Each structure stands twice: as structure tokens, then as C-alpha cells.
Image (tube, rainbow, N blue to C red):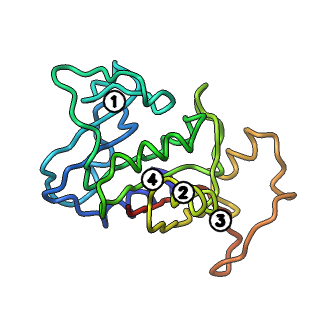
Amino acid sequence: MSKPRNQIVTWLKGVDIAGRRVLDVGAGPASKWARNWVQGEPAEYVTMDKDPSFGTDVVLDLNHPAEEIRTEGEAPKLKGFDVVFCLETLEHVWDPVRAARFLADAVKPGGSCYITVPFINPIHDKWDYLRYTGEWFHRVLPEVGFSYVEVHRRVATAGNVHLQMFYQAEGMRMSRIRYEVGDGHKIRDVGYSVRAVK
């Protein structure tokens, strides 16, 4: 597992979903990636993704959240969740403010939304549209209904293989990149982990 992915897993291990109603947006192939790392047994765990072949509970594209929901059986109500996860998904959304509004609407007052996004990362499929900064979350999430936003930087050092792959894929020379110095190492943000409370 890569260092940036390890940082996400470590962050998720501090989340307790015991007895909570949980929505996992962009869950992917019914593997419930977030569920593998968090603590506690939820009261309900609903998975959502745009691809019907993934076997998620709800088929809904964040790019078109107003469209009819496709599910097997009765569609769960996508509001009033204690916890919403949206992990490594927002980079695949071309209207992120609308998607952020959907996430805020899904969380009940006092509930939390956990979001992760890559920052320095090669384009990884044809639906990879955007990169975000910590400032984007601080600006946009309060505008869509969150009262508290906490942003954690995921960082890598200059010699990290993940960074080298990114620079090579994008045709950049590492010698021209400015780094921040932290803990005696040159570091760069490779992603962000965000907790937003409604």
C-alpha cells in the first residue's frame, strides 16, 4: 500500500461508526473500502456508486444527483445519515460544488462527512477531472451547509516513489519543483483528508 493510501487508512481508523447510519459515496465495487478500516458496527451501511456493475446498494452519479436513483428493491432515503464517506471520489466530479451540496444534504445536523482527495497524483482514468486544495474545502464546504471543516494534509517527501511517478507522468523535472521543509525533509502535499460537520 502506498504511503498516501496508508495515511488515509490511519486517518479512517480513528473514525467510530458504531450504531450510526452510514452512507459510502463512491464506494466502488461493493468492497466497502471505508468499512474495512473504521471502528464499530453501524446500524445501517449504504453504499453508492455510479456504476451498476459494482453491486452497490444505490446507483447514482454525483455528476447528476437529481436523476432517478436506481437500486435493487426499495431505494433508501439519502438523507439523515450520521456519517457520510466520500473517499477518493471528488476528483471524478465535474461540478464539485453541486456534489458537495449533495453530501451536505445527506448528513443530518451534527453528523460528519469524511472526504479524501488526491492532489499530486497522475490522471488515473478518463473521468479524472479535478484536483483540490485545502483552501477549496475551507471555502466551499461552509457555503453548502457544513458548520465546521477540518483539513488534514497528506504529504510525501521529495524522494517518494509516488511523487516521482507523478512528475514523470506529467513530464515535469523534479529539480524545478519547490518543496516545503518539514521535519528536516522536503515535503509536498499529495492529498487531503477532510472532516466536515453539519
Q: Amino acid at mark 1?
A: Pro
Please determine whether, in this image, residue 37 is positioned above or below residue 33.
Answer: below
- Circle nearer the viewer, 3 or 4: 4
Report the mark closest to the observer, 1 or 4. Answer: 4
How far apart are labels 2 and 3 at the CA level? 33 Å
Q: Which quadrant, please, contains the C terminus?
A: bottom left
Q: How far from the left and from the top, in percent, is residue 109?
A: 30, 60
Counting residues from the start of the chain, the first of labels 1 and 4 encountered is 1
80, above or below 152, in the image: above
Instruction: Give the spatial CA distance, label 3 vs label 4.
Output: 23 Å
Q: Tell whether label 4 touches label 2 (CB within 8 Å).
A: no
Q: In this rendering, would 35 be left or right of 12?
A: left
Residue where numbered disc 2 is placed: 143
Residue occupied by mark 3: 157
Q: Earlier in the sequence, mark 3 or mark 1?
A: 1
- Whichever of callouts 3 and 4 sits on the residue coming sooner in the sequence is 4
Which numbered disc covers residue 29? 1
- What numbered label is drawn on residue 3? none
> Are circles 3 and 4 on residues that touch, CB within 8 Å?
no
